[in-house]
Amino acid sequence: MSDLAKLLEHPALWRGDALARVRSGSLPTGSDRLDRELPGGGWPTGALTEILLERHGIGELSLLLPALARLSAGGRWLTWIAPPHTPFAPHLATTGIDLRRLIVVQPTARTGQPCRVPRDDIALQDTLWSTEQTLRANLCGAVLAWLPQAAVNGRGARARTSAASVRYAALRRLQLAAERSETFIVLFRPAQAASEASPAALRLALNPASNGRLAVHILKRRGVAAEAPVILDLKRPHAVDRHYAPAPAAGSLPAQRLGSNVLN
Amino acid sequence: MSVANEAALAKGVRPGMALAAAYALAHTLRVKQRDPLSEAEALRALAAWAGQFTPNVTIEDGAGLLLEVSGSLKLFGGIAPILRALRAGMSELGFTAAIAAAVTARAAWWLARSGKETLAQHLDELPAKLAALPIDVLAWPGEALTTLQALGVNTLGEAMALPRDGFARRFGQRLLDQLDQARGRLADPRSYFVPPEQFRSRLELPAAVEQASALLFATRRLLVELGGYLRARTCGVQQFRLRLEHDDAPFTELVFNLVAPGHDEAHLALLARERFDQLVLRAPVYQITLEADTLVALAGASLTLFHDHYSTDTDWNKLVERLRARLGHAAVHGLTIVAEHRPEYAVRRAELTEPRKAPQRAVTSPVDRPLWLLTTPRPLVEVDAKPYLRGPLALVAGPERIESGWWDGHDVRRDYFIAQDIDRSLLWVYRDPAAAGWFLHGLFA
């Protein structure tokens, strides 16, 4: 009997009715409600986290900022790979990010050289490569990498799926590199990637919710599948906070839900 | 014939043969003319490389190197590790060397010339080892050698046994002195090789190379040479250039900039590989030149740029250089804040080596600002006096007037609003009264 108990204590084993105990470290998200839903009580380090979104700028950075600020305050380095827009440094600094320890890698900046392959593919390959190199070096507290997003310019154009989709093997490489590091590694991917298999330890889909809040759907985590999305109050512009009415009761969840809770 | 490869030796070709005789034995023989200038150049390059073992390197008779390693024995842990490192390095550089070590320079030189890898660490074992050498390894005048052979003197031992005054009379004091120097009876001063101030080395490729990736092998050889040269001078390079020379096109120059001075050839080769991976050659390459003009003394020059508890500068430099080798220099940068009202000028790319201002932690943002800034503001259409993106935008806060920059010609006058998109995400938009239009400038991510 005690053998069984001992076996159940093994970190590689998780029971179907509980969140996995994680051996790798974890990083508080800054939200108790989200921490409770995540194995290890926070963002996983040494494992891949995927954040899926329809488009950029819906609160995905605000979601991560408490954890990033904590790393930054601890003197850790942050590397942002292929951010879709200019990170607005003056505001970043006020959220507690030490700009002296932030490195931006822009793979699309490569110019001049004649290319054998289409530009999109190069940008994707370079982003994956840079991410892997950075993980392997194991120097950063956090690495955020933005994989190409479907076009968001209102014309309804979608990125060519052949170019924008990432092969499972490529993600697997990143997961393996992540396991050998102590890095908090986040990949931002388009929402339609929810239907593809991924080796990531944690997969979240984000959607804006009412009153400037954010709905976090946990698509995959180590342990039981999550039931309902977590609705988070983000730090929002002061002027907007005043504008919004007090938060409604927890019953009024956003209508649209993305993906399902199945483990993949 | 001075040298023949194995295939030629198998056919009976021997060094010293006349060319016609060699052709008669092997009609498919490919003969390469000796190029004394290139040989001298290679020897100088090797001398610079060998400087990592001892500062006292001499180029001997234009055909070999003498390294005075007695001062380096302690550092390297004895003669055996030095010989091992020399042998490994020479083969990496693409040379085969006959290496001998002895307590006197001349004895070492003669032993090496004999082609036998000999080690004579004590003075008293020298006479025996020297005695067995044939006299034609001595590089003495042919006349002297012929006379000696006519006297029945074929080995160095027999030459040393000749009466001294007779030897001096017949062959000159110089040769007698050499015999004494070899046995350590006479001082044998030499002037040392002075390495050049700048590194420049070229390598002619055996065949024209059409694939950039195939250049790596040759480049690595040059980098090994550079590594030895830099270690000899306890210097690093912050920049080096590879010049690929084509037959009928202007040369291609690849410039490598390093974050911090480096001298580790393995790392430099990694950088070269990333660059070659993407390079499409405009014409076949027949020669590569590696140049490094500016050397940086390594001692005391290590900046604590990236240092934290988890990483060292060296690790960071290597990562950044690797990323840059593939993505280009501009692709890896930092961010810095500029005191400026116009948002697009308030954030600037920072060189990683440039000291950045500490973020003003104490000061909270006086006004609401987004986290993403669009590099160029995106024009929005106006529908019913409201900006329109995927649908009409609701203005939830504002306006905030930003009016600045009249002094530099990029003056702006904008009314910023926080707007809510149809999916309830927040946007930073502005209205330009002059252009009478709406623009999207940021995202509250």
Image (cartoon, coloured by chain):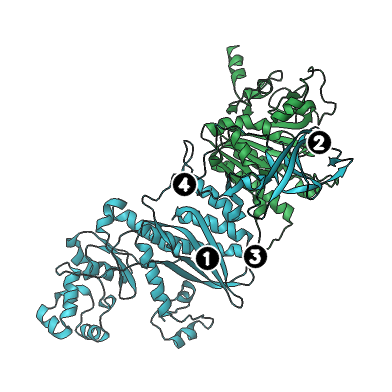
> What residue is drawn where x is 27% and y is 51%?
B74
Residue with the mark numbered 4: B314
Q: Which chain is green?
A: A
Q: Nearer the viewer, residue B230 or A172?
A: B230
Give chain B's shade.
Answer: cyan
Classify 10 Å Cα crowding around label 3: few (below 14), some (14-19), many (20 and above).
Answer: some
Instruction: Answer with mark 2 or mark 4, whichever residue precedes in sequence.
Output: 4
Instruction: Answer with mark 3 or mark 4, whichever residue precedes in sequence.
Output: 3
Classify 10 Å Cα crowding around label 1: few (below 14), some (14-19), many (20 and above).
Answer: many
Residue with the mark numbered 3: B280
Check contact, mark 3 vs mark 4: CB within 8 A. Answer: no
Name the amino acid type tagged 2: Asp
> What residue is drawn where x is 60% and y is 14%?
A5
Same-chain check, marks 1 and 3: yes
Instruction: Answer with mark 4 or mark 1, whichever residue precedes in sequence.
Output: 1
Task: From the image, state whether disc 2 or disc 3 is nearer to you.
Answer: 2
Q: Is residue A115 above or below residue A21?
A: below
Subunit under mark 3? B
Name the amino acid type tagged 1: Leu
